[in-house]
Amino acid sequence: MEKIERILQKVQKPARYVGGEYNQTIKDKDKVKIRAALCFPDTYEIGMSNLGMRILYGIFNNIEDVWCERVFAPWPDMESQLRESNISLYGLESHDALSEFDIIAFSIGYELSYTNVLNMLDLAGIPVRSADRDESHPIVIAGGACCYNPEPLTDFIDLFVIGEGEEAAVELIDLFRSNKASQSKTEKQSKPNSQNKQIKREKQEFLKKASELAGIYVPSQNDVSTRVIQKRTVKDLDNAYFPTKTIVPSMSIVHDRAVLELFRGCIRGCKFCAAGHTGSPRRIRSPNVLIRQAMESIESSGYDEIALLSLSTSDYPYLDELCDGLLKWCEPKKINLSLPSLRADSFNVNLMRRVQSTRKSGLTFAPEAGTQRLRDYINKKITEDELLGACASAFAGGWNTIKLYFMLGLPSETNEDVTAIAELSHKVLDVWRDNTNNKKRGVRITVSTSCFIPKPHTPFEREPQISMNEYLKRVELLRKSIKSKQISYNWHSPEQGFVEAALSRADKKLGKVIETAWHMGARFDSWSEYFSLKTWLGAFSKCGIDPDEYATRKRTDSEELPWSFIVTRGACDE
């Protein structure tokens, strides 16, 4: 710890790397049988805002003989200090080297974090390729949204959890424990000169048995040409574990508040949305369970804000009942209630007026497309009248800040669809003029666009992404079509979107591109200050692979997709 303390004086935000937070889990490492490291391939501030990380942390540590610690990707200044001082990447709770753990589990939610996965393994002194690791190295596991197409990471990951991991995590721990006990018994019965051979079989035996579990994909064991992998789904959320005694960060994080998960899945079926299609069916938590979880979360953490979390909060069937119960308890204690993920077609101004009675933060709506034709085509079930009606109610209720999110490059999009985004934003401005009670305050309307990225397991998985140049042409067309200074326009980088599209639809061959990009310095690719298109194009070129084959090429209906052995829908789906 003394060596770590010395280097922390040389980095920005040292609180990222010390641990010691309120409600962290500390166990006697001499009394636990299994040590697991839960790794998030991005900064502390983002990883600690991830509900999935908190859920798995609690599940692992609720098992008596397991101690789970957290590990986050070190910022480049910390990486330099670790390498210069020859200090291994370590767990926040014990500060022990990552290589001392039995299991390393990555939560991967974004393709542009792939190089951070490799970098974290390397910083731990663990070979990045699974083929180069032996029985002395930890088992490397991955789960999360990106694992619905695990193929680009198969060179590096021993085992993938496909789908929701709560139940699978417990099964894997039970299997690891029993396999370890079985091998220990075999070693005692073996002759001395055969013990090393028995020990070397332990890892392979575990992986072989794990490959037979539901929702588990082991690249070295599973033949994807003969077996499909059905995603894991937690069916009963009311009785599922939820982390009400959650870690309180010692520094500011992205979402620094208590959260309630209302439901999983989505009933909308937007054709571009991977989360909606892979997360089905919709499963809800009861209002009484959520109110109890809210009370326990606040009392154990001291937070003064609760956010309601789901893909579409206004689709929760008991939202009024839930908010009434929460506000009855929250208002006397001056606890704020936050409702993100609202839809314009079910916007409830009376509810929002109660929730934001003292502080009216901005409202965000995502029409996704400018014309009704294109919204209908992508199955975004919202009409212009519903959007303008929601805005009218909001402006009349005292709101003066509206953000509108759209995508450019959607399948079948035309220039008329692009200019219609500007027309729609001007109509929102007209609605403000007609409905506001205080024109002196002014209005802030922000239009944001991102580039459409075809994602696996969606109806658009075979569609091409438009080129970066074409995206910028459409950005310029939209920018020139917005005439009012009261409407601001922001657009996302097409360069990051291009690499993300290539990685999202990748096959095994792109593993060497990811590794080459990492060797060339790729880190924190989701951060604009570190992303380098030149680096990625150089990596593709070195590997003799054309990124357009993955990003901008339309897949034929007869073409087998790399992720076709993963099944995301089942008999219980809606």
Image (tube, grey):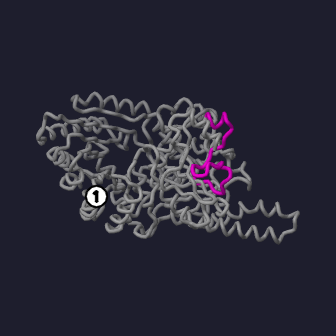
Q: Is residue 117 left or right of residue 303?
A: right
Location of residue 86 in the rendering, given as x and y in whole percent from the top left corner: 69, 38
Residue 398 visible: yes
Is 99 in the magenta? Answer: yes
Q: Is residue 311 left or right of residue 64?
A: left
* Rendering quarter of residue 286: bottom left
Name the residue at 61% across, 54% down: 104
The one of 529 and 89 positioned closer to us in this rendering: 89
Q: Amino acid at mark 1?
A: Cys
Name the residue at 37% across, 58% down: 298
The one of 170 and 299 positioned closer to us in this rendering: 299
* Rendering quarter of residue 188: bottom right
The one of 409 and 46 positioned closer to us in this rendering: 46
Location of residue 219 in the rendering, given as x and y in whole percent from the top left corner: 64, 56
Location of residue 61 in the rendering, given as x and y in whole percent from the top left corner: 55, 62
Q: Secondary structure at mark 1?
A: helix
Residue range in magenta is 80-105
Location of residue 57 in the rendering, given as x and y in whole percent from the top left corner: 52, 58
Residue 289 vs 350, above or below: the answer is below
Mark 1 crowd level (few <14, some 14–19, many ≥20, 10 Å Cα):
many
Residue 260 visible: no
Q: Is residue 528 left or right of residue 544?
A: left
Name the residue at 28% across, 41% down: 403
Question: Which quadrant of the rendered structure holds the C terminus?
Answer: bottom left
Question: Which quadrant of the rendered structure holds the N terminus?
Answer: top right
The one of 13 and 239 positioned closer to us in this rendering: 13
What residue is disc 1 on?
A: 330
* Rendering quarter of residue 238: bottom left
Residue 322 vs 128, above or below: the answer is below
The number of callouts visible is 1
Is 300 in the magenta? Answer: no
